[in-house]
Image (cartoon, coloured by chain):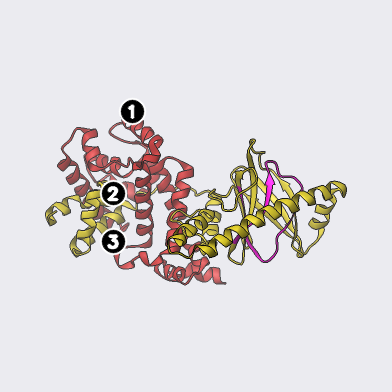
Amino acid sequence: MEHDEIIGLLGAYALDAVDRRERGLIEAHLDGCTMCCTEVGQFLEVASEFVPATQAPRSLWARILFSVRSHGVAVATRPRPWLGLVAAITVVALSGVVVIQQRRVVDLEATVARQMIEIDGQNRELDQVAPDRLVSAALGDPTSVQAVLSGETGSITFVIEPSGNAFLADSTLPPLPEGLTYQLWAVVDGEIISAAVLGPDPRLTPLRIEGSVAVLALTVEPVGGVVVSDQEPAAVWLADA
Amino acid sequence: MLYLDERTLEDNELVAAVADRDESALAEIYRRHGSQVFGLAKRVIRDEEMARDIAQDVFVSLWKKPEAFDASRGSLRTFLLAKTHSRSIDVIRSEASRRIREERDALLKSDSVPNVDDEVWQVTVAAKVRTALATIPERERDVIELAYFGGLTYREVAAHLGMAEGTVKSRIRSGLSRLQESMGQLGIVTA
C-alpha cells in the first residue's frame, strides 16, 4: 500500500475502523514514517476526548489489584489468576519441565482433599460445641483480623485469629444452585492457595489460614471444588485496602 | 506520605514506578484514568461485565508491560484509552459477542439513524469538547460517531449510510483534522 493510500486511512485507523489486514499494513508503515505517526498520534489524542464520564464499579480496582498480586502465578493473557497456572503447566509441558508443575498440581489436589476432610471433621466437632460461641470469641479478640470479602451479589466475613484459626462469621451471599459450591482462595506470600471449599450456602465454618494473607477471594465452582480455578472472584478482600 | 508523593508525579513517572513494581503508582494511574477507561469500554461494548473485564485487562497489561507505553508517542491517557477502544472493538467483532453485535445492529436500524445515540455527544463529553464538536459538519460527526462508538469499520459505515467508501474515509480524516484544530485552539489537545 502506497503512502498516499495509508494517509487516507489514518483517521479510520485511529478510530479502529479498519479491518485486520489494513491495520497490519498501516502499522508496518507507521514504523518508518514519522509524518503518519504524528498524524495518528494527534487523531488518537482527539479520540481520547470522546470519553463517557462513568463511575467505575468499586470492585474493579480490587479485581485489578488481585490480578496484579497474583501475577507471579498468572501467565494467561486474560488475567484469570487461577487459569494462569493451568496455562503455565501447558507451556512448561511443551518445554519438557512438566514434572515440577505436575507435582504442584498433585500437591494442590491433595491440599483440597485434605481441607475437605478437615472441614468435614471440624464441622462435626463444631456441631457439638456451639459454633457461634467460637466465632463470638474470635470476634471479641482484638488481635484477630476481620476480612470482609465484598462482591456484586453480597459479602462474606471471616475472622482470622493470629494462630491461623479462622471462622466464617457472616455471609449475605445467595445460596448457590445444586451442583455448585463456594471456594475460598488466599494469596499468601505471593502464592495462590485453596483455603476452603465452603459448600453452596456457607455457614459458621472453621478453617485454617496460615501465613501473611494479602488477598482472600471467593469463587463459585462445581461441587467438590477445583485445584485451579478459571472463574472471576465473586468477592474479594485485600489486606491493606 | 507515599500516597501524597504519588499524586504529585507525572503520568510517565508513574509508569516508570510501575516498571519498578510499585503498586501505589498503579493505584494512582487507576485513580486518574480508571473511570474513563471503564466508561469508554462500557459505551462501546454496552455490557457492564465485559467492560469491567476490558478495563481490568488494560490496567493489568500496563502492569505486565509498562514498556509498551512510549511517552514520545502521546499521553498515558491517550495510550490507555486507545488500548481500551481497540480491545472493545475486538470484542465486538469477535464471534463470541454475537449478542452485542445484534444489539448494535438493532440500534443502527432504529429511527435514530444516522446517529447511534443522539445524546452521546451531549452526555459523554465535556463542555469544551462539545464546543469543538459543534464546529465540524454534521456529516463528518456522524461517520466518526458510527465508527468510534458503533464499532463499525469505514466500509460498514459506508454500506450503512449508502455512501462510497472513499467518502467515508475522507470524512473521518477531515473531521478528525478539524477537531484537532479546534480542540487545539480551545487548549484541550496539543495544538
Report the side of A167 relative to A37 (left or right): right
Which amino acid is tagged 2?
Leu
Identify the chain drawn in red: B
Prevalent SS, magenta region: strand
Residue B32 visible to an observer of this rendering:
no
Q: CA distance from mark 2 to mark 3?
A: 18 Å
Frontmost residue, B1 versus B154: B154
Q: Which mark is residue B110?
A: 1
Identify the chain drawn in yellow: A
Q: Which dot, 3 or 1, sits closer to the camera? A: 1
Disc 3: which chain?
A: B
Disc 1: which chain?
A: B
Residue under label 2, please give it. A15
Q: CA distance from mark 1 to mark 2?
A: 23 Å
Which amino acid is tagged 3?
Thr
- Residue at image location 65% in from the left, 52% down from the top: A184
Which segment did they paint magenta?
A: A192-219
Q: Is residue B7 magenta?
A: no
Mark 1 on the same chain as mark 2 = no
Kindly state the secondary structure of the residue where label 2 is placed: loop
Q: Which mark is residue B190?
A: 3
Residue B40 x, y percent position in the rendering = 40, 48
Precedes in sequence: disc 3 or disc 1: 1
Residue B49 x, y percent position in the rendering = 49, 44
Residue A131 x, y percent position in the rendering = 83, 49
